[in-house]
Amino acid sequence: MKEIKITPTTSIIANEDGTLEGVLPMEGTLGIIFHGGRGFNWDTRTFNAPRAIKLPRVLEDDSSLNFHIAEIAHQEGILASKLNGQVGVVGANESFRINYVTVVDQDQRQTSEQPILGVYLSNTGKYKICLVYKDRVWPDDQAERLQLLDTTPAAIHQAVQGAIADSRSFDNDIELNGVVVVPERNHRAEAQGIHVMSRQTEQTYHSRETGGWWFNLPCMISPWMEVDLQRLLSEYLAKAASGQDYDERFGTWTIDSWCQLLDTLANGLANLHGLDAIHGDQRPANVMATFMGLGELVPSNFSWIDVGLGADLTAQPDEKKDHSPDSNGYTPPPLGGVRTSIFYAPERSEGIEYEDVDVVEIEESEADGKLSIRFFWRRNSLADVEQLQLKNETGAPIHVLGTLQQGDRVQFRDYLFEVDAVAGDHLLCNRAYELALGRVIVHLDAHRVADLFQRKSISRYRIFYHWSQASDIYSFGVLALYVFYVRGLVELLRESNNTSLAVLATDQTQREKAFEGLVLMLRNKTFQKNLYFSLREAGLDDSEALFNGRLEANSAREGRDAASQIVRIVLTSDNQFSVVRRGVNNNNGLFARLMLLCMKCVWRLDELTSEIDKRGNLIPFCPDRNRADTGAQGVASRDLLRYITDLRVMVGASMAVLSAPDTAEETRIAGRPTEPTDLLERHIHTEDELEKKEAELKETKEKLDKLRQRLESFKSELKRNKYGSFLRVDKNSVCRRMNELLAQSVVRSNEGES
């Protein structure tokens, strides 16, 4: 075995065949994690300080796509290094191009000659490394492979040296260049099968490849983290479903521990946003923990990972941050709509397609170089095209294109345009890109695009909404709800053998499908209006009332306190929320405040139609989807952190209350039976469904009016009957009974049960 120092403080251990010793490499969507560290112990074959070494996952069968993945890894390393040392965030200790290394043998002897490290990446073989010297290669069997690929160690060494020199002389550190690859299956005409990749070469040439040796790749070193939150929660549920009463990871956690977890993650988010960055992919799988030799989990040891894959708003000069047309070295943020998740904000996961435009026309402004895009449509197939108006005279949008904001993007054909502003009859765009393979984004010259689209027919266009720090806040609110939803499932599983609960515990797809209904309910406008009205009526729409005093014990028993009113509203809207309530030990006060936290995260101020909802504690953390705050960066996330900190103070003062289980009677009074019936059944009352119920209720009342008229007619008929004196007593009894039945029917109809 050989110890290979890729930096003075970080090593990897390689076997004689080039495979890596220790933990097997782990793959993500865009990266491969290798196990390394500092201070390798040859006796135990472990590192004193393990670290994660991340390289780009260049395993696609197209060279352009692989280079784009390497570009993303390069950008990730720059941002992750900037975030290093922040609490609640796993940044990068180091970010660099991996090339020259130092070799130490098992006798701790360090060689004087520094070889170049290459990494073999392929979908069909094991990941390996090689060391290329000026006149030889290690492992020895790789010399034969290089001969088959029509190259030599000297040629590779010279190519990498040239690429390193070019990288150092390049005046733009943001743009990636000088990646060297020796393809496994060579289709290029270049000498000796060596290809030096850059944005310029990959714009004009694509090739099919199946793997190869990569050199001078971007590399990122981070602290080693043992396990992610998604796996922990799944294991937590599985043990509860199998009848285990104790979980060694979460067994000692109290309500305060779970709130501390949210506090840690909110702190990390505030630190990330405070540095003008966006995470963009907040899911339980992107929250990881380190045990640090401890047998149990500690909430403060959790952190956000993949923090470099979002966006760095300060990586570009100010003019680029303000969306100038100069995009040299600018790598645009990823497109939404490629991956979906229940934790994503709508603008993060949606890429919506429309077919109401027939022709586009693009002109380049001579003043600022921006692109003006006009859209035309036909009323019918024989009519001439008419220009679409996007906004009316007052500036209000009258077309979906008129609702776009700065940073949103529009795609038609294989071209993507970044919106700077929306005028009455056209879009102003400052950047244009070409999509290759549906994913690779190549910047195009504005003049060239204007020539291509003087007036062109299109069949459809697609909108990708811009996502920002507000999207992170949204995801945090969903994650907070999910954590207590899982805890509620565990507690209910320990109390009963409900088969529906067991399905949710063991099947992540079914669990997330059921949980998605709660998220949709949070975003339901009728639900929002009813809940906010209850909060105002309960006096919880100001800060002092919300966090004043302790959480009350057995608050559901009387059923008249403020929190109980909110609980009734929520559980009436969707009984599935009772699982979340169980997750906070059925405490109405904590449940009400958790619901308000989630609502403040998933709603934005410009979405609230009532001015009454835009004040006090009801104000969402973010003003709109495009901005997280109105001033300095990170204001919204700091407000979120302050809310959770206040909640933790209240929880800490009420631990005796929160530890006491509620009785079945208290649960019943709160509006929910002790055991849920079938948690897989969804009854989400959207506005359309409520309108339908109102129409049915109106129809029922009309039928009752007709029945009342028939009753009066029957009374008159009885009076005219020649046996009236005989039937009068009987008639009064019948009428009295019919009136009683009629009154009961009216009551039931008013309750929506008719």
Image (cartoon, rainbow, N blue to C red):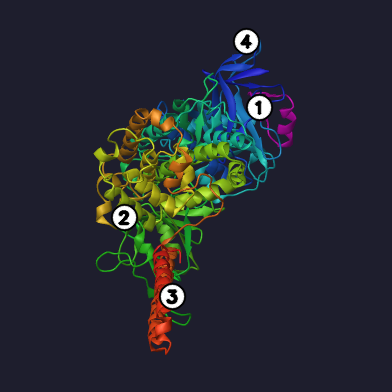
Question: Which secondary structure, mark 1?
Answer: strand
Give the label, 3 or 2, closer to the camera.
Answer: 3
Name which of mark 4 and mark 3 comes first in the sequence: 4
Give the label, 4 or 3, closer to the camera.
Answer: 3
Give the quarter of the image for residue 139. Answer: top right
Q: Which of 470 and 107 is in front in this view?
A: 470
Q: Name the disc covering residue 734, or none.
A: 3
Give how far apart the Cα atoms at labels 1 and 2 are: 59 Å
* Res 726 seen here: yes
Give how far apart the Cα atoms at labels 4 and 3 are: 108 Å
What is the span of residues highlighted in magenta in the rendered image? 128-152
**Circle 4 residues within 10 Å: few <14, some 14–19, many ≥20:** few
Give how far apart the Cα atoms at labels 3 and 2 are: 53 Å
Q: Name the disc covering residue 608, or none.
A: 2
- Image coordinates of residue 698 in percent, x first then y, are 39, 72
Give how far apart the Cα atoms at labels 2 and 4 are: 68 Å
Question: Which secondary structure, mark 3?
Answer: helix
Residue at image mark 1: 130
The reply to whether discs 2 and 4 touch (Cβ–Cβ < 8 Å) is no
